[in-house]
Amino acid sequence: PTPGAQAIQIDGLRVSFGDFVAIPHLTFIARYGEVHGVIGPNGAGKTTMMDVITGKTKPKKGTVRLDGSIDLLGLDEPTIALAGVGRKFQKPSVFEALSVRENLEIALRLKPRSILAELRNWSDRRRVARVGEVLNEIGLSAQADLSAGVLAHGQKQWLEIGMLLMQRPKLLMLDEPVAGMTDEETSHTADLVRRLRSPERAVLVIEHDMAFVEEIADRVTVLHEGNPIFEGRMEDARQDAQVRAVYLGR
Ligand code: ADP
């Protein structure tokens, strides 16, 4: 992919739950090479948007395209994940009894058979190299042989991001990555997320912590009642009258 090209493109999205319209009409683009923050008060529709991208929720109307062409709405959740959508939920779910390194290796194996066949062709050296790269990216090289269970909360979160990176996602979505973290862990996570910026990847971060978003995001979208009320730089969002009204009115 070319940096700046559309990793995910949502057009005319409408999502309702019974009579309740959570997202009336959403257009949204996340681009390769960017970290894109999605913010907005509780109930704004952030989770619903992610659920649509991953295939968990099917909308009434609209299109969702990955990498310019792949229509995600016709695919089921595992196929969407395989197509290159990685999502990290708030709570870490690592395999506590396995080492950090083994968790990363397992992440490669959690792929369907066809991919497994391809992986068998990977030399051990290549696999070890990939694990090494990711360990380095998530800053856990020194902990590679520790049980994941003994890691601090923040380190577990980074490991889980690493597990997603093993699959080389085109779109990586992080749901409140700094919830429950200490200040030190938060600042470490900001460094990590900034390093996740890559020409082959778009990173989408849903977050309540505005200071964190300002540190990491190239661009933010502010959602309110399912509508994007602002898109641009976080420093400009802070000055925007509508955004301020939505946040101050809480
Ligand atoms: P956010 O993640 O921004 O806090 P959500 O996407 O979780 O917002 O929710 C958007 C709106 O949709 C909220 O009003 C929420 O109550 C509603 N909603 C979300 N999921 C469901 C569901 N499964 N059934 C009914 N209403 C839902």
Image (cartoon, rainbow, N blue to C red):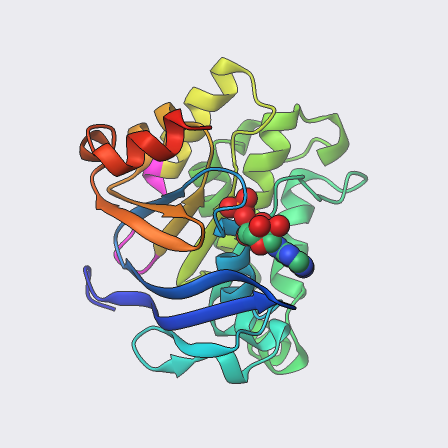
x then y, percent, for residue 195: 34, 39
Residue at 47% in and 28% down = 250
Is 146 left or right of 124, judged from the image as shown? right
Give the image location of residue 114, x and y in percent: 61, 83
- Which quarter of the image is occupied by the N terminus? bottom left
User: Vertical placement of 183 versus 163: above or below?
Assistant: above
Above-or-below relation of 202 to 72: above
The residue range painted magenta reads 194-201
Q: Residue furthest right?
A: 97
The residue lying at 52 percent from left, 37 percent from top is 176
Left or right of 3 on screen, residue 67: right
Above or below, 3 against 101 in this view is below
Q: Is residue 128 visible?
A: no
Q: Position of residue 131 (x, y in %)?
A: 53, 49
Residue 22 in the figure: left or right of residue 102: left
Q: Residue 207, position in %: x, y?
A: 46, 37
